[in-house]
Image (spheres, helix red, strand yellow):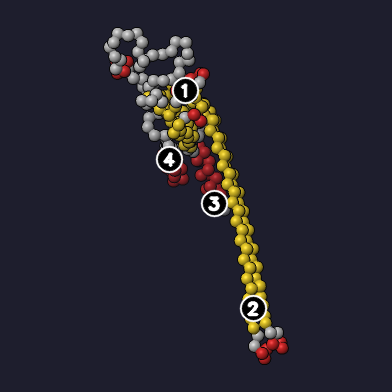
Amino acid sequence: MKSTAFIATLATLLAGCASEPTSIVAGPTSARPIPVPALQVPANGAIYQAQSFRPVFEDRRGRMVGDIINVVITERTTANKNGTSSATRTGGVGIGIPGPLQGRFGARVATETDNNYADSAAQTASNAFTGTLGVTVVEVLPNGNLVVAGEKQIAMDKGTEFIRISGTVNPDTIGAGNAVPSTAIADARVEYRTNTHLDRAELTSMASRFFLSLLPF
């Protein structure tokens, strides 16, 4: 009975550890479109209004708050580091022998030392992150650039995967299909994090094997 209560308590504690991981993406990851009255459209009676204009014969690329843009994540980083060091040291010592001992040791005794040191190190790191994520325009800057952010959560068997991205997009880099590569996003913050946890059945099996290993038979 005590072991069952211990296992249940441990499972509850571990379940509490499966919280949402920290994020390097600052600010909201989504935004609602601005209502039309809030656009402050000038009451000049003109049909064309720059604030709400949408090209008719072009792809409907995101350009306003609340619009969605497809980000093609193609992040690849490779870093190489090489280092080499060497040192050489040579020394000599000569000692004069007193007269009574010269017949046995000679007039002088000389020693020489030669120390050589060489070291080299090499380090290589490579990372790849690919995928596609839909992001939302959360702000339109005065120069026309778009501040975007987005998040995707994928629930797996043992936890949840979090994919987040934020940054600033130049509308000219948005191509066909309303897509932009992540390499063209300024101040990009791309992250992939997970929170995993152990279910009660797996924890019970682990605890049972632990207690059985302590038995003398």
Q: Which residue is mark 2?
A: 94
Q: Which residue is mark 1?
A: 172
Determine the CA span between mark 3 and mark 4.
Answer: 28 Å
Of 125 and 187, which appears nearest the observer? 187
Residue located farthest toward the left when viewing the structure as drawn: 43
Determine the CA span between mark 3 and mark 1.
Answer: 67 Å
Q: Residue at x 64, y 88 (%)?
A: 98
Q: Look at discs 2 and 3 and give the one toward the viewer.
A: 2
Q: Look at discs 3 and 4 and give the one toward the viewer.
A: 4
Q: Look at discs 3 and 1 and give the one toward the viewer.
A: 1
Determine the CA span between mark 2 and mark 3.
Answer: 69 Å
Mark 3 residue crowding within 10 angstroms, few (<14) / some (14–19) / many (20+)? few
Q: Which residue is mark 4?
A: 17
Determine the CA span between mark 1 and mark 4.
Answer: 44 Å
Q: Which residue is mark 3?
A: 214
Nearer-N-terminus badge (4/2): 4
Q: Residue at x 60, y 56 (%)?
A: 85
Q: Secondary structure at mark 1?
A: helix
Nearer-N-terminus badge (3/1): 1
The quadrant of the rendering that contains the N terminus is top left
Q: Look at discs 1 and 4 and give the one toward the viewer.
A: 1
Q: Secondary structure at mark 2?
A: strand
Q: Quadrant of residue 130?
A: top right
